[in-house]
Image (spheres, helix red, strand yellow):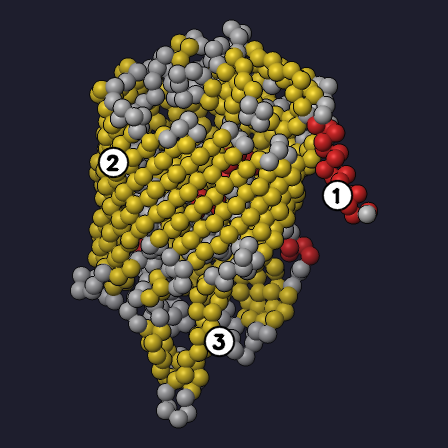
Amino acid sequence: MKPLFCLLMVFWIPAVAFSQTGTIQGTVYNDSTKEPLAGAEVLIVEIDTRQKIDENGKFVFRAIPAGTYTLITTVPDTELSQRTSIVVTAEETLEPKIYVETSQYRLEGIEVTGESAPKTVSKKSLQAQEITRIPGTAGDALRALPAIPGIGVANDFSGALYIRGGSDEDNLYYFDRVPVGYPYHFGGIVSSLSSEIIDRIDVYAGGYGAEYGVDSQAVIDIYSQDSSSANLRGKFNLNLLFSEGLLQGKVGEKGYWYAAGRRSYIDLFIGSLSFDTGAITAFPRFWDYQLKAGYDFNEKHQLFFNIFASGDRFALKLDGENVDEDFQGNVSFESGFEGAGIHLRSFLTERLTSYLSLTRSKFLFDVNFGPTLSLEIDAPDYVLREDLIYELNPKHRLESGLILGFEPGRVTGTFTRIPDEGETDYDIRFEEKVALDETVRGQRLEAYLQDRYALLPFLSVVFGLRFDYFNRIDQLSVQPRGSVLVELPNSSEIQFAYGIYNQTPLPPQLSPSIGNPALKSSRASHYILELKRPLSQDTEIKMAAYYKNLADLVTVDEETGYLNQGVGYAQGTEIFLRHRSGDRFFGWISYAYALSKRRDRPDEPYRFYSFDQTHVATFAASYNLTPTWELGAKWQYRTGNPYTPIEDATKVPDPRGNGRPIYRPIYAETNSDRLPPYHRLDLRVSKTFQFSRWKLGIFLELLNAYNRKNLLDYRYTYTDDIESGGVNIEREDANQLPILPYLGITAEF
């Protein structure tokens, strides 16, 4: 009976606390003017209670049971809204101050009189309150992105995003206007930005406007929190991989700050580990931190700065008999990223807005692999950016921007050329090793001009031009972009977008030692058609069709290393049905079809791109049973990745002259086969315990709940066939994650 009694106590104690009540007596402010915002409405989601705000911006809710609630503040006849999480404690009166973001609208006093500017092609947005609750991600915001249509990943261990038939090299990440070159630790185990400080993530899968897009075909724009609901607030997480903490607070009545950080800790318990072919001498570890502070000097000038960094490291020693001589000895890997920026938003006049940023980012990479291979990269990037918005009238807006970039960098070590995507016969053991000592002085000039105009009440257009110049290829690219939006009588929207998106070659491809400095930019032409229709107040459906034509792709050439000789295309359709009922329930069903092909050289046929995933279907849902209990599930199906099978092998003398024979595989046509389909179910349950001044949260996720054996890759072994004189090939499966429970604990005050 004791276990049953303890279990009943766990449920009964919170129920007793819930029977006590408190009061919410708050004020709503215009975030731009800091004045009370009259005429708005506040909804408490969990108990479906709403109230109009008086002329002083005040509202009062009495006799609210103790617990955690979500307040949604909306302004009638606009899209303005603000979500606020609040903790009600027994016999206490809370006095929250809610600031509604209004910077994208023209304001007169405290009344919203303008209209939203005509939009470019729609973005996919995930709010912080949803992204950290998606099952299978352990609350990691960036790991949640593959749950939305058009975005895929290679496997369970990778965070590299494949967006609409592209590779991760086509993606550009921003974090509060600072470019991010290292979004994931160890390639995808966990993101390098704490999810606790993220407010929302906007994903532009293609067809976006001229304001984005140096060297990209997709943009992931990450926004962190820009306010604090309390003078001091903290949250601490503990899970199987790492621990993290967040502190945030106010600076007077007009400022805010936060500091977040985390570190893995397995290396603290396991210093080294031996195995058959060597030993791990430094167990893998990662860390990151994020700092931000902002202050509104007055209603016209807002300043904030941010600093963030991340790092990964591990080391091992290989000395077994089966280890190739090129790899024997010490192996070490260290990589990281630093970012910082200072940003000033100024409302210079009633119509002219300026957004000025000075940022610095730095990518660090240091790897040593055996006795001969090493590579060290030190690549800082300094960017000065100014964006101007001028509103001719509420229906007509001009936008312009100027970006100056300076990229001093250095590469040292001994390495080989970089393999091309889909290249099967690349073997680093037999590639020419080249001594590298290169200094780079990259200079970029970017500019754009964009016009947003609502021609008619139901018709708006956006047209822009983007100009990019990069001194290392001495090329000026002109990229026109535009879209047309039609609002239909049934509240639906249909939109067409077109754009040119240029990408400069990767730095190794431009290297004079292992690449070709004469390369030029590749070019992608995007054609996108989207339809969005609300089915009800809480439900909407989105459909999209796209086609991308690719030209001047950089591919391997025997004589010059690389040439702009590749072409390709990507096409597909997407359907996204989404329902949200306050914070009680959210969920969606999506399906994406895609076809992505490449032709590497003019005399070769088209082949499947390595990142092609033909069919992707996703179901995700989360439901709050009570204010403290939540259940969630996510299921996803993906077509298997293309791969190149091995048909045969030959036994030849080692070309390095050591007298040993080696087996050289003989491959079929590039990406002529596929791995089996991938599908996986993830479940999540979370419970919050509310105390007088703090709360405790526990979540348990069950990854791959029905233990599907999803194939990661094939491993081949070769033996001599004595009878035939040939080679026997044995193939074994290497699988991805098995069924795996994942426990996390949070404490918040």
Q: Residue at x 26, y 49 (%)?
A: 571
Whole-angstrom CA distance, mark 1 to mark 2, is 57 Å
Using the image as rendered, state which of residue 318 and residue 164 is in the foreground: 164
Crowding near pointer 3: few (<14 within 10 Å), some, many (20+)? some
Q: Residue furthest left?
A: 603
Q: Position of residue 534 (x, y in %)?
A: 36, 30
- The answer to whether residue 168 shows anywhere in this view is no
Q: Quadrant of residue 329?
A: bottom right
Q: Quadrant of residue 599?
A: bottom left
**Count of marks overlaid on the render:** 3
In-image side of 415 versus 322 (left or right):
left
Discs 2, 3 touching: Cβ within 8 Å? no
Whole-angstrom CA distance, mark 3 to mark 1, is 59 Å
Discs 1, 2 touching: Cβ within 8 Å? no
- Disc sitting over residue 325 in the figure: 3
Secondary structure under the numbered disc 3 in the rendered image = loop
Q: Which residue is mark 1?
A: 7
The vertical placement of 174 against 564, above or below, is above
